[in-house]
Amino acid sequence: MSAPDALFWLFSVLMLACGLLVLLSTNAVTSAVFLVLLFFFMAGLFVLLDAYFLAVIQILVYTGAVMV
């Protein structure tokens, strides 16, 4: 298994875990933190696809909107 394949599976599993934790969290603040982590892992998938602009926009727009 090559490094991009391993990173893809790592990011995918972590995104699924964060998504479940967003749904199962009883505290709104921890749910928002897990959502921010999910967006960072999604940006990592965009970097693996060589879509650097989408990764930066993902972090700036969506993560920035959740943090506000």
Image (tube, helix red, strand yellow):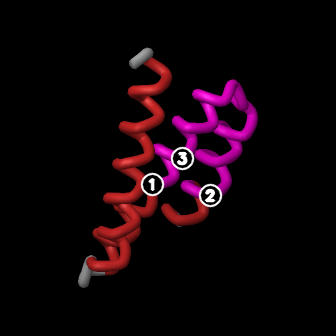
Residue 3 appears left or right of 28: right
Instruction: Give the foreground label among 1 and 2.
Output: 1
Judge the density around disc 1: few (<14), some (14-19), many (≥20) Cα neighbours within 10 Å: many
Tell me the residue that label 1 is attached to: 38
**Measured along the vertical axis of the image, is residue 68 above or below residue 56?**
below
Residue in view at x 51 percent, y 52 percent: 39
Disc 1 on helix, strand or loop?
helix
Residue 14 appears left or right of 58: left
Q: Position of residue 51 (x, y in %)?
A: 72, 31
**Numbered range of the magenta stretch:** 38-63
The numbered mark at residue 60 is none
Q: Earlier in the sequence, mark 3 or mark 2?
A: 3
Residue in view at x 39 percent, y 27 percent: 6
Disc 2 on helix, strand or loop?
helix
Judge the density around disc 3: few (<14), some (14-19), many (≥20) Cα neighbours within 10 Å: many
Q: Position of residue 42 (x, y in %)?
A: 54, 46
Total numbered labels: 3
**Res 43 quadrant in image:** top right
The numbered mark at residue 62 is 2
What amino acid is found at the position of numbered circle 2 in the picture? Tyr
- State the residue in front, 48 or 67: 48
Disc 3 on helix, strand or loop?
helix
Q: CA distance from mark 1 to mark 2?
A: 11 Å
Q: CA distance from mark 3 to mark 2?
A: 11 Å
Judge the density around disc 2: few (<14), some (14-19), many (≥20) Cα neighbours within 10 Å: some
Q: Position of residue 40 (x, y in %)?
A: 48, 45
What amino acid is found at the position of numbered circle 1 in the picture? Leu
User: Chief secondary structure of the magenta span?
Assistant: helix
Q: Earlier in the sequence, mark 1 or mark 2?
A: 1
Residue in view at x 70 percent, y 44 percent: 57
Residues at discs 3 and 1 in contact (Cβ within 8 Å) = yes
The numbered mark at residue 42 is 3
